[in-house]
Image (tube, helix red, strand yellow):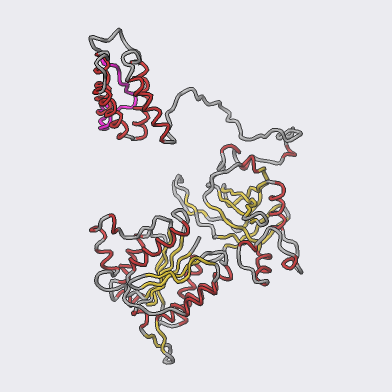
Amino acid sequence: MPTVVLMDVSLSMTRPVSLDGSEEFQRKNLAVHGLNMLFEHMASNYRLEFTALMAFSSLWELLVPFTRDYNALQEALSNLEDYDKTCVESALHGVNNVVQQEWGNACPCQVVLVTDGSLGIGKGSLRHSLQTLKQRGDDKKFPLPFPFPTKLFVMCIANAEELQMTDGMDNLEELLRLSGGDGQIFTMEGPLCMKSVQAMFGRLIDHAYSPFHAVLHCGNLSSDVQVFPRPEPIIVDDEVDPMPRNVNTDLEIMGFIEIADIASPPVISRHLVLPIAVNKEVDEVGAGTAEELEEEPSSSQMAGKSPNFCVLLHGSLKVEGMVALVQLGPEWYGMLYSQADSKKKSNLMMSLFEPGSEPLPWLGKISHLGPISEAAENPYGEDDSKSPFPLQPPVKRSYAQNVTVWIKASGLQTDVQKILRNARKLPDKTQTFYKELNRLRKAALAFGFWELLKGVAELLERECTMLPDSAHPDAAFQLSHAAQQLKLASTGDSQYAAFDHNIVPMHTDFSRGGYEI
């Protein structure tokens, strides 16, 4: 999960702070000290994290683009310049641009806003931005909420008492609410000093940047690992009393299965699994990128170190083309597998399934799976020519009913064109015309696609006006009747929009007998 650090470099950040009667510091110096502490922690524990540094006042500037080089981030902090007034809205627009250019809209991102709580004055201030939220056009929308998942952390170089003297805290809380509420506001406790700012950034580290250490077990073998990024708690919506579910720190491998049998299952998140022993050795030789965490450490990394089960597991999964099913908690499972970054290097990954005893229906209940040796005969055959998966359901389902599904626009277009083709051959194709029309009507009602009914009605009216002079008189009556019935159904009125109701042909003097629909 990448991080954007947004540093306030307005004039209010240059206000002096007296430290125990000694040399005077500015609030900016306290902020830089806290950020250096954060970067040092990430360099040691989160060195695979991509971090960007931005500075803002009335304008914003990207000082360091997304990088894993924390020395470059700390160097940029030491060269900060002072500018004019604070404009948080402009800075948030900058964050939106920077993140979307690098990661798009799907990647979750953490934003660390470092400010002193003086949020500007007049036009451009946070107070003015929040007061004018409802008076804006689409071209001047407030940047929050971001189009990508976000956690916003506000680090105030001020204590709570100072913020409560103004409306600064209220404005920051509203900012947090607009971002989605998934974040926190941190303030300094006690006097403004180095110790207080260290404590504040320490709380941020404990909350958002603490590494997730676990023990991976497989029978009598085990290995200490770090899971990156830290797995987030999951809330199951269909529970009566939903409670956050956390990944256990003891990860138990239940068994192994071929990649072809598990296919590409739906997952809620993916994580990198790092063996801690290898991790420490990599630090000693100065490596710091994902590419340097290979499936098999170099001889210099392995020197003087006992064998590691995690490295053995990774190599085995890669060579055998299998995945390991792992239990994350009560009725919660995931899988471990090897994923290649390039032709030569790969990583051990862990994907989390949806909580439940049967996350992958084609495998059945995970707890019912067992070793091949316990089966009466090899389910894969003597020559591995077959597979026991997917499991066949105990009751054979009937697929005789034709259910209309529009996955692509071309499917919908085909159904509409079929109706129009039959409309042009009325009255000879009256039965087929109404059959296709009712099929489309039911699907549109099921999906709540009222606009489709109205659009097809307009197409039928157009066909009616374009009928040639040689057309049968009954064709015009049937087209007008069908168009009128579709328009009535598009209103949502229960009298005309009943799902089980069918549009029947209009009986006219030209009708040749009855029609069956």
Q: Is residue 319 magenta?
A: no
Nearer-the-camera pick, 277 or 343? 343
Q: Is residue 127 left or right of residue 67?
A: left
- Position of residue 39 relative to residue 26, above or below, is above
Is residue 474 something that shows in the picture? yes
Name the residue at 30% across, 21% down: 503
Nearer-the-camera pick, 145 or 396? 145
Name the quadrant of the C terminus. top left
Q: Is residue 483 left or right of residue 401?
A: left
To which quarter of the image does residue 370 belong?
top right
Percent of width and height locating residue 172: 34, 67
Percent of width and height locating residue 351: 58, 51
Q: Is residue 494 magenta?
A: yes
Name the residue at 76% across, 33% down: 382
Is residue 186 something that shows in the picture? no
To which quarter of the image does residue 474 belong?
top left
Specify start and end residues of the magenta stretch as a single range: 488-506
- Position of residue 436 relative to residue 230, above or below, is above
Percent of width and height locating residue 25: 42, 86
Nearer-the-camera pick, 434 or 218? 434
